[in-house]
Image (cartoon, rainbow, N blue to C red):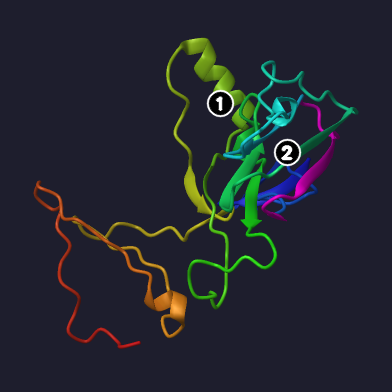
Amino acid sequence: MTNVTRLCETKSIVTVNGQFPGPKLVAREGDQVIVRVVNHVPYNITLHWHGVRQLRSAWADGPAYVTQCPIQKGHTYVYNFTIVGQRGTLWWHAHISWLRSTVYGAIIILPKLGVPYPFAKPYKEVPIIFGEWWKADTEQVISQALQTGGGPNVSDAYTINGLPGPLYNCSAKGVWFMHCHLEVHTSWGLRMAWLVLDGSLPNQKLPPPPSDLPKC
């Protein structure tokens, strides 16, 4: 368990190696991946490698009570699988109860050595993981939802790489535009853009950019 502060409040959450989000896993196509999980938290847990094709290794897929028994407190389990015919960015997460709300991270699968990329080499690569944050204990949130039959309470914030954005008071009605600052003078930045569609209802249209908008 790790104490993490978000939205001006601190709570204890389940993490992997004390990191939130969890560690980034990097492998190459054809690699054998071995992950040893030691459960030091009071909850049973499993890990699922989302999007990874488990060929003859279903026991490494991770869904609790489906392909494996949960890893109990103080116990160890070794995930062993080979990445076949895949490359790109995937993610891993807990696959029992609602522990995935804090137990997750990126999986980067690179091409085999000597295999060229189908595009120009990027200037920089930064995984971006979208998530949610609850001030309440997420295990209690899902437990309440299961007992009542309703949906779980909405989160208190959306997150990018585990961090919520700044909070702004709405000073006027209408549509507000949120954007990300990119290194626009690099090859990858020049090829990124946000596509925004206006809505059909009142106050669902974005105004044109101001005439004094600074140039890159």
Gap between marks 1 and 2 measured at Cα: 15 Å
Camera-nearest label, 1 or 2: 2
- The answer to whether residue 29 is magenta is yes
Which type of secondary structure does the marked residue at label 1 adopt? helix
Q: Residue at x 46, y 61 (%)?
A: 166
Instruction: Kindly identify the amino acid type of the residue bearing the numbered disc 2.
Output: Val
Instruction: Kindly identify the amino acid type of the residue bearing the numbered disc 1.
Output: Val
**Position of 81 relative to 70 (above/below):** below
Q: Can residue 182 be seen in the rendering of this structure?
A: no
**Position of 192 relative to 32 (above/below):** below
Q: Horizontal placement of 88 versus 177: left or right?
A: right
Q: How many marks?
A: 2
Query: Disc 1 or 2, which lies upstream in sequence?
Result: 2
Nearer-the-camera pick, 138 or 125: 125
Q: Horizontal placement of 174 versus 1: left or right?
A: left
Q: Position of residue 99 (x, y in %)?
A: 65, 32
* Residue 215: quadrant of the picture: bottom left
Which quadrant is home to the N terminus?
A: top right
Which type of secondary structure does the marked residue at label 2 adopt? loop
User: Residue 14: which numbered mark, if any?
Assistant: 2
Q: Residue at x 20, y 75 (%)?
A: 209
Q: Can residue 64 be seen in the rendering of this structure?
A: yes
Q: Residue at x 60, y 51 (%)?
A: 6
Q: Position of residue 206 (x, y in %)?
A: 17, 62
Residue labelled with disc 1: 141
Q: Position of residue 204 (x, y in %)?
A: 15, 52
* Residue 113: quadrant of the picture: bottom right
Instruction: Please provide the residue range marked out in magenta.
Output: 25-43
